[in-house]
Image: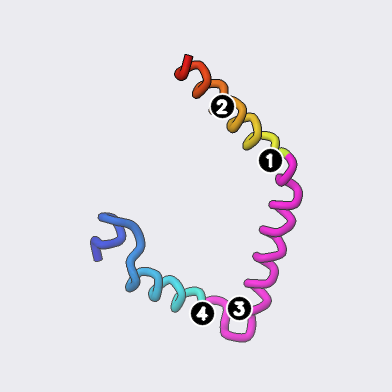
Amino acid sequence: MFGLFRGGFGLPEIILILFIVLLLFGATRLPQLAKSMGSAIKEFRKAAGPSLDEGSTDTKATNRRTRSRKAS
């Protein structure tokens, strides 16, 4: 019972959550739900992709500058 609060999710907690989701949505609706969630994540990544890429290149450039200063 207290495993959820001590160290994250274990196997019993994940099984319980999946069982509750199965009860709420039913076996026939789960594939539709998973497909819609997957397409929503895909659209989000597509929309956020350029801005996330710009941030990662800025971080890489900052790391290179920091390393070159330390080497000097």
**Relative side of 44 to 25, left or right:** right
Residue name at image x 30 percent, y 60 percent = 4
For disc 2, the marked residue is: 64
Label placed on residue 30: 3
Q: Is residue 33 above or below residue 52?
A: below
Residue 45 belongs to magenta span:
yes
| Element class at badge 1 | helix
The reply to whether dot 4 and dot 3 touch (C-beta < 8 Å) is: yes
Give residue 14's mark.
none
> For this rendering, which residue is in front, 61 or 41?
61
How far apart are the alpha carbons under marks 1 and 3? Answer: 33 Å
C-alpha distance separating marks 2 and 4: 49 Å
**Residue topped by disc 1:** 53
Q: Quadrant of the N terminus?
A: bottom left
Mark 2 vs mark 4: in front: 2
Label 2 CA crowd tier, 10 Å (few <14, some 14–19, many 20+): few
Circle 1 crowding by C-alpha within 10 Å: few under 14, some 14–19, many from 20: few
Q: Is there CB contact under 8 Å for labels 2 and 1?
A: no
- At 48% from the left and 14% from the top, the residue drawn is 72
Residue 13, magenta (yes or no): no
Query: Label 3 crowding class (10 Å Cα cut-off): few <14, some 14-19, many 20+?
Result: some
Q: Amino acid at mark 2?
A: Arg
Q: Label 1 is placed on what type of residue?
A: Asp
